[in-house]
Image: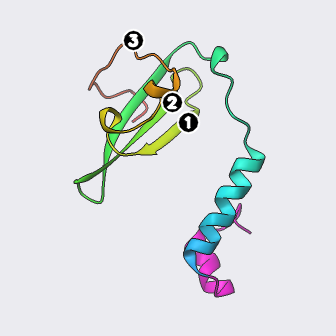
Amino acid sequence: MLTLLPIKQIVGLTGLHWHTLKTIDKGRLTRDLPEPDLSLFRYLVMDEFALFKGHRYASVVIDAETRQVLWVGEGRSGKRSGPASSGWGLIASTSRRWPWT
């Protein structure tokens, strides 16, 4: 059911707590989606965005050619462990908007 409906709707249907369903969904994603093979990617895009109208931030790393999301993490890139601390090298950064946004 988690692959078909939003968690909020499943909560209404089943009566389970949102956090319980989120934990189940994270386990499913971890099981079903393998870790990406970083040697296959030539260009990476990293973006930071505000959560809840500022004060909290998240970052996302995307394969620029396929637009596949490779990594998402809460916090600013310089203030937590993330792609850079995992051996992902950043070669360029830009604030320019990409054509698909």
The residue under the point 77% across, 47% down is 32
User: Relative to the observer, which residue lies in front, 13 or 72?
Assistant: 72
**The C terminus is located in which quarter?**
top left
Judge whether residue 4 is colored magenta: yes
**The N terminus is located in which quarter?**
bottom right
For residue 2, above or below residue 95? below
Amino acid type for the residue under numbered disc 2: Ile
Q: Secondary structure at mark 2?
A: strand
Amino acid type for the residue under numbered disc 3: Ile
Dot 3 or dot 1: first in sequence order is 1
Q: CA distance from mark 2 to mark 3?
A: 14 Å
The residue under the point 22% across, 54% down is 55
Q: Is residue 67 left or right of residue 28?
A: left
- Local crowd at mark 1 within 10 Å, few (<14), some, or many (≥20)? some
* Residue at the spot of label 1: 69
Amino acid type for the residue under numbered disc 1: Val
User: Relative to the observer, which residue lies in front, 86 or 72?
Assistant: 86
* Residue at the spot of label 3: 91
Q: Picture quarter containing residue 36?
A: top right
Q: How far from the left and from the top, in percent, is residue 91? A: 39, 11
Judge whether residue 85 is colored magenta: no
Determine if residue 6 is in view.
no
Q: How far from the left and from the top, in percent, is residue 7? A: 59, 70
Give the foreground label among 2 and 3: 3
Q: Is residue 53 left or right of residue 2?
A: left
Check residue 62 in the rendering and tell me which mark sits there, or answer none. 2
Q: CA distance from mark 3 to mark 1?
A: 18 Å
Check residue 96 in the rendering and tell me which mark sits there, or answer none. none
Query: Are the residues tagged 2 and 1 within 8 Å (C-beta)?
Result: yes
Q: How far from the left and from the top, in percent, is residue 13? A: 66, 85
Task: Please provide the residue range marked out in magenta.
Answer: 1-16
Give the foreground label among 3 and 1: 3
